[in-house]
Amino acid sequence: MEDKVIKMWMDKGLPTTKVPIDANVIKIPIEAMANLQVEQAVKDKIAEFESVKLRKKKTGYV
C-alpha cells in the first residue's frame, strides 16, 4: 500500500504532510470497542502474543 501511495500521490507532486510517529494515533470510543466483532483467528493470535509476552516477563525475574 505504501508503494501505491508513493506512486499514485507523492510522485505526482500532490500535497503531503509529514506526521511524527507519536502523532499518528487515533482514539476509539469504548462503545465502538464493545460492539466490535472480531474473528476467532484474530482472538487466538492476540492470546498467543499475550502468552509469549507473559512468559518473557516471568523468565526475566528468575
Image: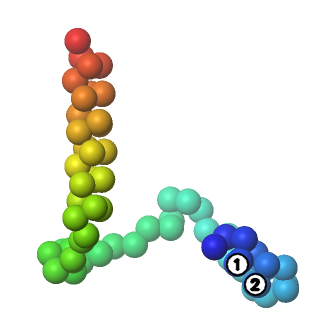
Task: Name the quadrant of the C terminus.
Answer: top left
Occupied quadrant, residue 10? bottom right
Q: Amino acid at mark 1?
A: Val
Viewer-proximal residue among 62 and 30: 62
In the displayed structure, 8 sits above or below 46; it is: below
Residue 47 placement (x, y as % from top left): 23, 49
The residue pinned by badge 1 equals 5
Q: Name the one closer to the observer, 45 or 7.
A: 45
Taking the view exactly as shown, the residue that stands out farthest to the front is 41
Specify the amino acid type for callout 2.
Trp
| Label 1 secondary element | helix
Q: Return the residue found at the far top.
A: 62
On screen, residue 40 above or below 13? above
Q: Residue at x 21, y 77 (%)?
A: 36
Q: Position of residue 3 (x, y in %)?
A: 72, 71
Quarter-wise, where is residue 32 in the image? bottom left
9, 37: nearer the viewer? 37
Verify CB contact (< 8 Å) between mark 1 and mark 2: yes
Q: Which residue is mark 2?
A: 9
The residue lying at 29 percent from left, 19 percent from top is 60
Q: How is the image coloured?
A: rainbow
Query: How far across and down, in percent of the image, does residue 1 sit?
Result: 63, 73
What is the CA distance from the residue labelled 1 to the residue labelled 2? 5 Å
| Residue found at x 27% / y 45% | 48
Residue 6, position in %: x, y?
76, 75
Say which residue appears at 14% left-offset and 75% top-offset.
34
Question: In this image, 17 relative to 30: left or right?
Answer: right
Image position of 10 (left or right of 57): right
